[in-house]
Image: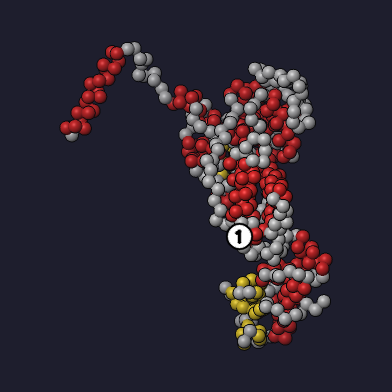
């Protein structure tokens, strides 16, 4: 195959912010590719290139060798373009840059197998990439994901895949997915199950699709992003489910290595428990319970709990502390600073320190928590997120901490976020509102005692005295 065909690609060496680059231009879109470092250093020390009508001419020691290397770089970019174009791909400047680098590193080859491997790894799109393929690429390559997040994103992909199959467009190109199709997807999601899905869950699917489309468009994997301005308006649900003090006490006082049965007050069902096929007791269940208790007294999710090390553990002013930047808010450097309570310290010491805490696979941990929640008769699914809610609930209602202190210990960017985890409940009001010095209500005479004070206040406002 002749890869050196006449094409709309334009190649020119350019000095950009002090660095010499190969400027690749296709249809007016530019991609700048730095030349190899060893070559760049030589040119930098020799005071660079002279430009003559787009033709490079390096003057100085080793000019012939350097110019030959620059010429080979241009030819390699032409080969990359010609290869993609010859096998039916309409490459962008960024595609040429990426494919050339792949050829140079031996990741691909300049034949049909090399192009197929390039496409399979999600590097290209050319405007005809299927939406499902783009979503799968985004899930696998956009950012490093925690196991729970990755499985959740796969569920989002399964939802859109079923929808596209339902409407008869399983291979719908990503840049053909428009606002009207998104609205149809929302309608389908609202009616897909026996009971309506919550709008907050539907919004999570939409956010995932929009993020993938934006990333694909920014990388020129797709030529249009027709849902960039799509807005889904809904009332956000707030889930503040948490364990009660009695439930926490049961977890802490029960030996789960032996048959435990149900929590007192929970009626045992006539049929076996449904859900994951994991035992209700045993060494592993005890580990899961211990780590769940730790979540309830530190506010850590699964991913942050699994990342705890001894370096996060310290002793200051006669108290033990955990200080750790949470993964979710690491961009904002929001550090959780927790002054540990005895319940948390007991778990840490039981296993010999933070670095020695048991590490459980995400799905294993989740399955055991589901079974544990059934033993407790919970009306919701037990997760480490419930542990985080429980910590917030205790801060506000049991321990009497302020919003600011609670936010700092939980590693939140703002106190406004606390409402997602817990609310001030009756215990909190009772703890903070103290009537001991006022006396109990004893009839009209109490009201009579207050009247002169009230009248005095009104007199000040009326007369300005």
Picture quadrant of residue 452 = top left
In this view, the residue in front, 162 or 60, is 162
Picture quadrant of residue 362 = top right
The residue positioned 39% from the left and 18% from the top of the image is 436
The residue positioned 53% from the left and 33% from the top of the image is 422
Q: Position of residue 154 (x, y in %)?
A: 71, 47
Query: Relative to 176, is 105 above or below?
Result: below
Q: Position of residue 60 (x, y in %)?
A: 66, 86
Q: Is residue 105 left or right of residue 135?
A: right
Image quadrant holding the C terminus, namely top left
Q: Is residue 46 left or right of residue 115?
A: left
Q: Position of residue 383 (x, y in %)?
A: 66, 34
Count every numbered label the image shows and give the total. 1
Query: Relative to 37, is 309 above or below?
Result: above
Instruction: Examine the rendering and report whether any part of residue 224 can be seen.
Output: yes
Q: How is the image coloured?
A: secondary structure
Image quadrant holding the N terminus, namely bottom right
Query: Relative to 461, is 327 above or below?
Result: below
Q: Position of residue 322 (x, y in %)?
A: 59, 38
The residue positioned 65% from the left and 74% from the top of the image is 26
In this view, the residue in front, 198 or 442, is 198
For label 1, the residue is 225
In this view, the residue in front, 17 or 201, is 201
Q: Secondary structure at mark 1?
A: loop
């Amino acid at each position: 195959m002749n890869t050196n065909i006449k094409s709309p690609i334009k190649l020119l060496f350019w000095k950009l912010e002090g660095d010499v680059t190969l400027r690749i231009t296709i249809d007016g879109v530019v991609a700048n590719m730095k030349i190899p470092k060893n070559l760049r250093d030589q040119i930098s020390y020799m005071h660079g290139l002279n430009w003559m009508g787009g033709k490079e001419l390096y003057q100085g020691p080793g000019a012939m060798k350097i110019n030959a290397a620059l010429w080979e770089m241009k030819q390699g970019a032409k080969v990359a373009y010609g290869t993609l174009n010859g096998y039916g791909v309409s490459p962008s400047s960024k595609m040429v840059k990426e494919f050339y680098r792949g050829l140079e590193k031996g990741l691909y080859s300049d034949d049909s197998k090399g192009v197929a491997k390039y496409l399979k790894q999600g590097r290209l799109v050319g405007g005809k990439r299927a939406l499902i393929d783009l979503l799968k690429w985004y899930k696998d390559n956009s950012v490093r994901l925690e196991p729970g997040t990755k499985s959740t994103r796969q569920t989002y992909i399964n939802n859109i895949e079923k929808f596209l199959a339902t409407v008869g467009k399983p291979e719908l190109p990503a840049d053909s997915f428009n606002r009207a199709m998104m609205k149809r997807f929302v309608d389908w999601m609202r009616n897909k199950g026996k009971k309506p899905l919550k709008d907050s869950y539907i919004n999570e699917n939409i956010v995932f699709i929009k993020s993938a489309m934006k990333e694909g468009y920014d990388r020129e994997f797709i030529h249009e992003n027709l849902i960039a301005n799509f807005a889904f308006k809904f009332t956000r649900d707030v889930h503040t489910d948490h364990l009660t003090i009695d439930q926490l006490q049961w977890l802490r006082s029960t030996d789960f290595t032996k048959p435990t049965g149900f929590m007192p007050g929970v009626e045992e069902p006539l049929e076996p428990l449904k859900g994951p096929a994991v035992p209700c007791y045993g060494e592993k269940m005890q580990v899961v319970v211990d780590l769940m208790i730790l979540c309830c007294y530190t506010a850590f999710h699964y991913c942050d709990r699994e990342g705890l090390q001894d370096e996060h553990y310290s002793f200051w002013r006669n108290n033990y502390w955990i200080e750790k930047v949470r993964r979710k808010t690491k961009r904002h450097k929001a550090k959780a600073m927790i002054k540990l309570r005895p319940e948390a310290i007991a778990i840490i010491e039981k296993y010999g320190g933070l670095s020695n805490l048991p590490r459980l696979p995400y799905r294993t941990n989740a399955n055991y928590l589901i079974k544990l929640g059934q033993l407790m008769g919970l009306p919701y699914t037990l997760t480490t997120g419930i542990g985080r809610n429980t910590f917030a609930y205790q801060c506000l209602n049991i321990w009497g901490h302020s919003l600011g202190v609670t936010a700092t210990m939980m590693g939140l960017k703002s106190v406004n976020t606390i409402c997602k985890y817990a609310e001030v409940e009756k215990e909190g009001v009772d703890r903070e509102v103290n009537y001991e010095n006022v006396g109990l209500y004893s009839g009209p005479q109490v009201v009579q005692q207050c009247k002169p004070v009230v009248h005095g206040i009104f007199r000040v406002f009326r007369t300005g005295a």
